[in-house]
């Protein structure tokens, strides 16, 4: 029988209150707390590498940063996240190389049932979020479960991305729509 962690990572309904998942979130909160309280000179990058699944060269994540598990986050070379970013990583969140995140960017993988009776059970599902290379995500943008952002795209500040974003376009709004293509 699969564990709740295995169900979560498979995108199946899972119980987030399962002891194994609660312990994993506590571990991530502790590492994030330590990361946020540590300076670059004190070894902040080593804590990020302990928290995340994969970290490329020269990452910058400004405090305060929050995540659910950490082990489902991968960031490429030259990754930059400004202050106040939140990653709810119940499923993989993958950023390509040279991605830039403005302040307060939120990335969500968990989702709850629409049906109120089913939602009352407390079970949820999660879908991965994938961001290509050379993407710029403006401050306070939100990426919702299951979206893919193409290479070279720009997500405008405050955008709520609910659908996949093609390569080399600018999107904005709520829900985010293509504003223009990038030459």
Image (cartoon, rainbow, N blue to C red):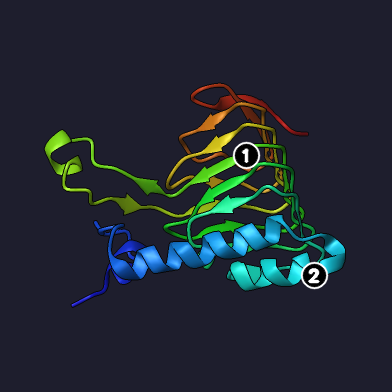
* Front one among 137 and 181: 137
State which quarter of the image contains the N terminus.
bottom left
Q: In the drawing, does residue 118 fall left or right of residue 75?
A: left
Can you say whether 169 is above or below 30 in the image? above
For the residue carrying disc 2, how many other residues have a C-alpha within 10 Å: few (<14), some (14-19), or many (20+)? few
Can you say whether 3 is above or below 40 in the image? below
Secondary structure of the residue carrying numbered label 2: loop
Cα separation between marks 2 and 1? 24 Å
* Front one among 159 and 171: 159
Where residue 35 appears, as percent x and y from the top left, is 69, 61
The residue at the far bottom in this view is 1
Secondary structure of the residue carrying numbered label 1: loop
User: Which of disc 1 and disc 2 is earlier in sequence?
Assistant: 2
Where residue 87 appears, as percent x and y from the top left, is 54, 50
Q: Nearer the viewer, mark 2 or mark 1?
A: 2
State which quarter of the image contains the C terminus.
top right
* Front one among 112 and 99: 112
Q: In the drawing, does residue 61 fall left or right of residue 105?
A: right
Q: In the drawing, does residue 115 fall left or right of residue 105?
A: left
Can you say whether 98 is above or below 182 in the image? below
> What residue is pinned by disc 2?
43
| Residue 105 numbered tag | 1
- The total of numbered circles placed on residues is 2
The residue shown at (61%, 59%) is 32
């Amino acid at each position: 029988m699969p564990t709740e962690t295995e169900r979560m990572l498979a995108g199946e309904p899972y119980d987030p209150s399962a002891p194994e998942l609660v312990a994993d979130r506590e571990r991530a909160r502790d590492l994030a707390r330590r990361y946020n309280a540590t300076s670059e000179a004190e070894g902040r990058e080593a804590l990020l590498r302990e928290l995340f699944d994969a970290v490329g060269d020269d990452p910058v994540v400004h405090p305060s940063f929050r995540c659910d598990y950490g082990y489902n986050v991968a960031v490429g070379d030259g990754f930059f996240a400004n202050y106040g970013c939140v990653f709810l990583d119940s499923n993989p969140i993958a950023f390509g190389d040279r991605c830039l995140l403005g302040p307060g960017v939120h990335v969500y993988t968990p989702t709850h049932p629409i049906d109120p009776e089913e939602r009352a059970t407390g079970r949820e599902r999660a879908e991965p979020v994938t961001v290509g290379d050379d993407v710029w995500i403006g401050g306070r943008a939100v990426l919702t479960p299951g979206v893919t952002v193409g290479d070279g795209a720009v997500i405008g500040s405050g955008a709520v991305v609910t659908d996949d974003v093609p390569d080399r376009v600018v999107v904005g709004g709520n829900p985010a729509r293509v504003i223009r293509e990038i030459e």
